[in-house]
Image (cartoon, rainbow, N blue to C red):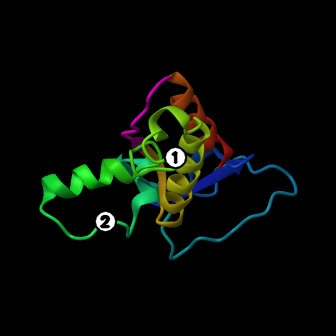
Amino acid sequence: ARRDVVLANGKIEAIANANEADVPTGAEVIDCTHRMLMPGFVNAHTHSTEHWTRGLILPLPLELWVLELMRHTPVGDKGWHDEDSFVRTAAAYGGLSAIHCGAEAMLSGCTAIVDHLFARNADDVGAAVQGYKAL
């Protein structure tokens, strides 16, 4: 059945039966007849910090590929500061990873992400949260 959707400040404010919505004076009305309004998709399994490794690792059996993957993340022994990457890489890498992951997700229609973030400490988690909020 047809419904009217009222948006305010980028969020759904009301869903009402057709022609029964309380539409604020001066609001823009978009006729979506012959269209479908769908919620965003959910990416239920991603690892934002692995975006940095895309294209770096040659095809290998899964176990070897995963080992190489972990070594090439920003905090791995082939990361941003070579063998000292685990202790020297700033937590901000998690924020940058989250921004990249979130932007890519939004471009593909996702509006929610479950990030299986490899975090060394609470600062890494905080930086990732701030990165997602920045979007």
- Dot 2 falls on a residue whose secondary structure is loop
Q: Which mark is residue 16?
A: none
Task: Tell me if 62 is positioned left or right of 90 in this view.
Answer: left
Kind of residue sitting beneath label 1: His
Nearest the eye: 84 or 67:
84
User: Which residue is tagged 2?
Assistant: 57
Q: Amino acid at mark 2?
A: Ile
Which residues fall within the magenta stretch?
114-121
Q: Is residue 120 magenta?
A: yes
Label 1, residues with CA under 10 Å away: few <14, some 14-19, many ≥20: some
Report the residue at 57% width, 47% height from top.
15
Q: Position of residue 77 (x, y in %)?
A: 38, 45
The residue where tag 1 is placed is 81
> Viewer-proximal residue, 117 or 34?
117
Q: Provide residue 119's location: percent of width, then percent of height.
A: 43, 32
Disc 1 secondary structure class: loop
